[in-house]
Amino acid sequence: MMKAIRTVTTQVRRIEAAGDDIMLLDLADPDDWELPPFDAGNHIDLHLPNGLVRSYSLCGARTDSRRYQVAIKREETGRGGSIAAHALRPGDTVPVSLPRGTFRVAADAREHLFIAGGIGITPFVAMAAQLGPDVPFSLHVLHRGAPPLAALCEAMLPREHVHYHRSGDGRPRVDLAALIGPFHAGRHVYCCGPDALMDAVADLTRDWPDGHVHIEHFVPPERPLDPDAKPYQVTLSVSNKSFDVLPNASLLDTLRQHDIEVDAACEGGICGACRVRWIDGQPVHHDRVLTDAEREREVIVCVSGCASARLVLAL
Ligand code: FES
């Protein structure tokens, strides 16, 4: 049984430079119909011409229903997605997934502190723009070289709330502890950027109450092989099929090998594209997207393992 992968056909309308090796890509319906709506903080998967599928945060105004905007930094040593994206030209067709994601502004927050490392700014422009005029927020952008998305920030956000901290070339690094400051009720911190920055923010806020620190990963972490991993059987309840999964094998790859299509993008447990409902068994969760409550019924098949002899999926 094949699980339908839903995509929307878009066309590249405009490409502009938005920082060092960063391009801002405007995507629209080929006939200018409205696109599926999104929430600030959502991302979409781009199905690139070389066959790769990569997730990028939507950074434009969510009130602009005829355009998706994504910013992509060219990574020479990456896995090839950004290079394929940078080869796109106006008029090219790009299928994209429906918008999705779990990164969003906290509805109960009274103050928002966004900390972006370089291209990690992408979700925060739309998130900050969504806040009402009376909601206090500050966006701190830590960068080297040209500031990323400066023109977009200028167009969408009040200038006094956006702070650039340039490092490198002998400049001192920002004092992150002073920037974050102490916790007080209603204060929420959000961070997206390189692992070292996100680890530092997590460390400096480790005593904050649960749910007040929000971290968005955009590079899948390295995952060492589990020496204790055991083989198991995956059973698909809808198509009534069963397959063996070898120790440390990717469940996503095993499904694909048997022509079971599942949405996927990052293949590293950070985008949520491949979430599937599980019915029975003991999945071992290695993702960074699901909440504990979601793990009670869903599993991220690109990185999950299984501690029981059988795992039953609703496929
Ligand atoms: S493909 Fe991104 S979480 Fe599985």
Image (tube, helix red, strand yellow):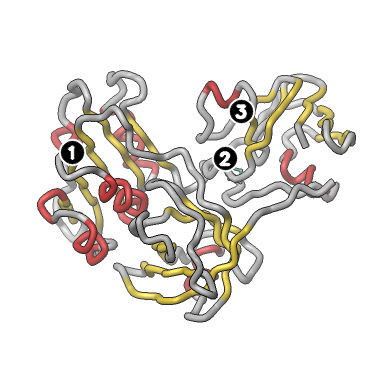
**Contact (CB < 8 A) between labels 2 and 3?**
no
Q: What element carries label 2?
A: loop
Within 10 angstroms of label 1, few (less than 14), some, or many (20 or more) residues? few
**Direction from residue 292 to residue 249 in the image, left or right:** right
Residue at numbered disc 1: 135
Earlier sequence position, callout 1 versus callout 3: 1
Expressed as whole percent of the image width and height from the top left, the position of residue 82 reads 49, 65
Q: In this view, does 2 lie above or below 312?
A: below
Mark toward the viewer: 1 or 3: 1
Q: Distance between the residues labelled 1 and 2?
A: 32 Å
Residue at horizontal 10 percent and vertical 52 percent from the top: 160
* Image disc number at residue 269: 2
Within 10 angstroms of label 2, few (less than 14), some, or many (20 or more) residues? many
Residue at horizontal 68 percent and vertical 31 percent from the top: 277
Give the quarter of the figure containing the C terminus: top right
Expressed as whole percent of the image width and height from the top left, the position of residue 190 reads 31, 38
Farthest-out residue, front = 33
Type of amino acid at the residue the image marks with label 1: Val
Q: In which image quadrant can residue 110 be found?
A: top left
Quarter of the rendered image showing ligand 1: top right
Earlier sequence position, callout 1 versus callout 2: 1
Earlier sequence position, callout 2 versus callout 3: 2
* Image disc number at residue 285: 3
Q: Which of 36 and 240 is in front in this view?
A: 36
